[in-house]
Structures are given as C-alpha cells and as structure tokens.
Image (tube, rainbow, N blue to C red):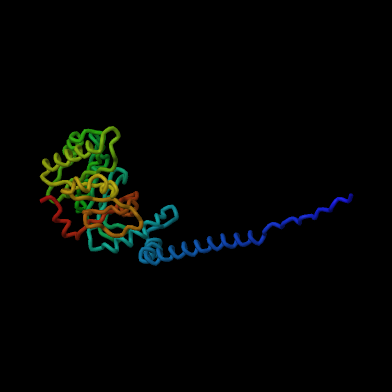
Amino acid sequence: MRKPTQKKIPLKRKATVKRKSSYFKSNKVFFGLGIIFISLLMTAAYHYKNGLAYYLGFKTNKVIRNSAEAKHFSDVRNFQLLSKYSEKAIGLDVSQYQEQIDWPSVRAVENTFPVRFVFIRATVGKDKVDLQFKNNWMGSKDNKILRGAYHYYRPNENSLEQAAIFIKTVQLRKGDLPPVLDIESLPENQPIDSLKVGLRRWLQKIDAHYKVKPIIYTGEKYYNAFLKEEFNEYTFWIANYNFFVEDIKDDWLFWQFTERATVRGIPCDVDVNIYNGTPKMLQYLTIN
C-alpha cells in the first residue's frame, strides 16, 4: 500500500520588519529625549544668561588666567542669584578650612558684590578652638566687616562644656553680630529629645552670658524635621545649595546658598550667605 506523502510545512522567515520597526521606535525615543534635554539646556542658558555673560566675558578674561584656575559652573548661578538680591546684605562664613585669609584684599564676592558681614568659626565641641579664629576675628574687624562667631555643636558631647569653651574663646563687642549655634548632625547614642535638651541648654547659657539671643544655623531638612516647631522663638540661618532654589524664604534670617564662591584674598572656595534684609537693617541686628 502506498504511503500518503506528507506536505512539507514551509519554514517561517524571521520578522525582520518587526525588528526594523522596534529599531526605529527606540531611535525616536532617544531623539525625543535628546530634543527635551537640549530644550532644557537652552532654557537654563537663557535663564542664566547674565551669569554666563559675566563668566565667559569679564571673569574669563580678567580673573581666570589658565585652565588650572577654572572655576565651577556654580559661579554662573552665584552671579545670577547675587544680582537678583543685590539690595540685600551679602556675607561669608569662614573657618580654618579657608586657610590663611588676606583680609585687606577681601572686598567683594566674584569681584562685584560687596562683602558686608562674615561669620567666623570659633569653637568645635567641648575642646577645640578653630586654628584660624584669632586671625580671622581680628582681620575682619580691621577690614571693617561686620563679624560674628559660631560654634560647631557635637551632639554626643556635653552641651554646657561646649558653651563654656565658646564663652572662653569669644569676646563679643558692640557692633558684632549675635553668636551662632551650628547644628548639622544627629546624636549616635541618645534620642532626639535629649539632643533638643542639650541645644536649649547651650542657647540659654550663651543668651545669659552675652545678653543676646543666639541664631541657629542648620540645613533646611534638619530645620523642618527637628527645629522649626520647638525652637520657633529663635531666628534661623539656613543652608540650602539646591541649584534650582532661587528664593529666600520669609522665615530664613540668613540663607547660605553656595559653598563654592570666589573671593579675592581667600585661597579656597568659600560659603556665601544672603541676609534677608538690607545692609542698614543688618546694622540693627548687631549687639548694641
């Protein structure tokens, strides 16, 4: 008996068209993302056009001499932001990390915006005096810049001992700015409530000694999470370096908006701060 012949099923070809289709789709996605990125870049460039003009024109030709001295792109933002707040008082904060400062040369941020005040680190924890405090304290005074002193608080050390070393180190005079408590970190071996007790003891001890209410320095997140509600009788100096934040909030007495600025006379990058008021108003904040 003859066996029926089986029909051969033709092999299916691979769907090359589908591959091409997905290839073009992915290319379209990348192309679209590229257009969005370029648009954002152009928008940012337009927004910071004054800062870019300054950086590429004045600064490149007259301040930066070679590539080794090239500064961060943040200089563009610094110039733009300081231009926006030119009617307010602009100032610095320094410590031994800025090395030896040539105070007679300290005049303006980015050679444009006058330095009206400076906060100087005096002490750290219960036993450390900043290595450059004495030079900076006298140098800023001789250079006729309003000065203030701050203490870097260590959460795991005794608060009253920390207040004692600050009092021993810093002699405030008429015309100086109020003392500052710098708190940035959380304790390792104690609850947050104990930290708050220690902070309040330091503040009260300093207030009683100098007869002036201290200012509290901290980061914005730390401020919102731990200090804003329970220490609302104090004024705050807030650090926020977010590149896209351009407005000083009403409850910020000072705003530290960058840690990367150029000031003639200071060999390293330096923090810059905006006082939420005019230079004349800043005078009323000083000790009388």
Residue toward you, 81 or 264: 81
Q: Is residue 48 left or right of residue 168?
A: right
All told, the count of numbered labels is 0
**What is the x, y in percent for residue 93?**
26, 49
Give the residue furthest to the right: 1
Above or below 180: residue 246: below
Residue toward you, 118 or 138: 118
**What is the x, y in percent for residue 63?**
37, 59
Q: Is residue 76 left or right of residue 211?
A: right
Residue toward you, 28 or 9: 9
Q: Is residue 135 visible?
A: no
Q: Is residue 92 visible?
A: yes
Residue drawn 29% across the image and 63% down it: 83
Residue drawn 17% across the image and 48% down it: 234
**What is the x, y in percent for residue 155?**
25, 37
**What is the x, y in percent for residue 49?**
38, 66
